[in-house]
Image (tube, helix red, strand yellow):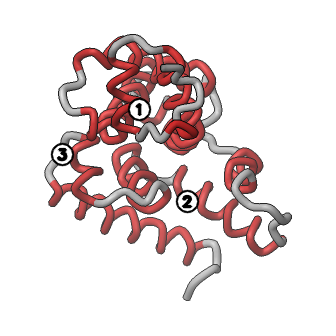
Amino acid sequence: MSKVLADDQGINEQQMVELSQQGDAASFRHLYRRYQQRVRSTLYQLCGQQMLDDLVQDVFLRVWKGLPKLKNSSYFSTWLYRITWNVAQDQRKKYGQMSQFQTDIAPDETIKYIDSKSVEMPNLLHLHYQDLVARGLQSLSLEQRAVLVLHDLEDLPQKEVAEILNIPVGTVKSRLFNGHTAMRKFLQQEGEII
């Protein structure tokens, strides 16, 4: 059976993962197309623009190599985000301490990702708030930023964020609270909220 048009043939994601585990490149390409933009956005929010293409490529190379070891194909997306987090962590280690780690997120790059999902041009107020979110995320630690990006921007449940980051759910809740507090403080300093 040809797997190139998996959706047209009624093959669900779990089946695509299983076919990819057996070495089916067409199914893996479909998984790549499905998740590439999400991985790119997550890495961008965690690491900035520097070497972004290489980081995305590294994630999917690790996924391809590790697929045969994935025991439960229904946890593919959680496993993929875990690999994404590991790649971000490795990038951080390459650049040493957080103070030396390049995390500048250009507001126009964030806008490109968000705009790709909308049909009409965003208004100036929308662009302003996207810029604020990007700058606010830059002010957080990598750990807080990871939790906010995965939970608030990628809309993953706290339990899945905990699995991805390999931390307790209580730590996720604490980082969310502290990250939201820091973002609120940032917005107050910017004069956006009282």
Task: Kindly tell me whether residue 103 is visible in this rendering.
Answer: no
Precedes in sequence: disc 2 or disc 3: 2
Q: In this view, does 27 lie to the left or right of 160?
A: right
In which quadrant of the rendered view does residue 167 lie? top left
Nearest to the observer: residue 29 or residue 170: 29
Classify 162 as above or below 14.
below
Within-10-Å neighbours for mark 1: few <14, some 14–19, many 20+: many
Res. 167 mark: 3
Q: Which amino acid does label 3 sit on?
A: Ile
* Local secondary structure at mark 1: helix
User: What residue is pinned by disc 1?
Assistant: 84
State the residue at coordinates (69%, 56%): 117
Pointer 1 or 3: first along the chain? 1
Determine which of the numbered discs, if any, sits on residue 136 in the image.
2
Position of the C terminus by quadrant? bottom right
CA gap, disc 1 to disc 3? Answer: 15 Å
Q: Residue at x 68, y 69 (%)?
A: 129
Mark positioned earlier in the residue sequence (1 or 2): 1
> Which residue is rendered at x = 59% and y = 30% of the image?
5
Indicate the quadrant where residue 187 lies: bottom right
The residue depicted at 46 percent of the width and 35 percent of the height is: 99
Q: What element carries label 3?
A: loop
- 193 over 141 or under it: above or below: below
Q: Position of residue 2 (x, y in %)?
A: 53, 20
Residue 187 lies left or right of residue 174; in this view the side is right
Which callout, 2 or 3, points to the residue nearer the camera?
A: 3
Residue 17: percent from left, percent from top: 37, 28
